Amino acid sequence: MNQESFDIHRQLVEACKGGNRKAYNELYNAYAKAMYNICFRMMNNADEAKDMLQEGFIEAFHRLESFRNESTFGAWLKRIVINKCINALEKRKIDWADEEITDSNTALYHDDRIDEEELKMSVDRVKKAMGLLPEGARVIFSLYLLEGYDHSEISIILNISESTSKSQFMRARQMVKDTLLKMSMV
């Protein structure tokens, strides 16, 4: 985001704090698509993603007075939206870890004979492969690879060990690679 966009969004936040309903709508329109994409990747269901999007914006708008411009509004909103998704997923009693793996056997999951660049898959195929992941693995894969969280942050967010986050990510990555490979053979 460039400085001009940052300033416009800061002005919209201040206008919202002042009760300007048009500013709420403009702020929603500025971030809705990006936040929906996050929700969809986390929930893997369009209707649930829409629900999480709405709940995230409702909470953000209710808590707007607590936003202090210490980060961008988008980063603050993203955290709220991700937390909404995680809370909804936890209500399903997701088993975040099938088993923990130690550093000594992580090599089993580092089969790099298939170079991701060589696969040259479309974004749609990757999304489809992600959608086939078990829920817990998909969430960790999305948080790490797409949302930019590191494993220590994911362990705190999901209340799991860092090694569980790493092992689930490696397992998910391998499953995505395997799925993409199968798709390319069809």
Image (cartoon, grey):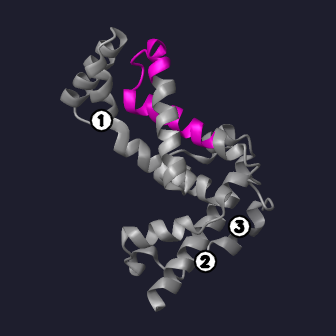
Highlighted range, magenta: 61-86
- The residue at 34%/32% (across/down) is 28
In the rendered view, would you say 136 is above or below 58?
below
- The answer to whether marks 1 and 3 mark residues whose Cβ atoms lie closer than 8 Å is no
- Residues packed near mark 1 inside 10 Å, few (<14), some (14 to 19) or many (20 plus): few
Task: Say whether residue 6 is visible.
Answer: yes
- The residue at 55%/51% (across/down) is 42
User: Circle 1 is placed at which residue position?
Assistant: 29
The percent position of residue 65, horizontal first and vertical second, equals: 45, 12
Residue that extends furthest to the front in the rendered view of this protein:
47
Give the camera-side residue of 46 and 140. Answer: 46
Q: Is residue 180 left or right of residue 12?
A: right
User: Circle 3 is placed at which residue position?
Assistant: 106
Q: Is residue 7 left or right of residue 66?
A: left
User: Circle 2 is placed at which residue position?
Assistant: 111
The magenta stretch spans residue 67: yes
Q: Quadrant of the N terminus?
A: top left
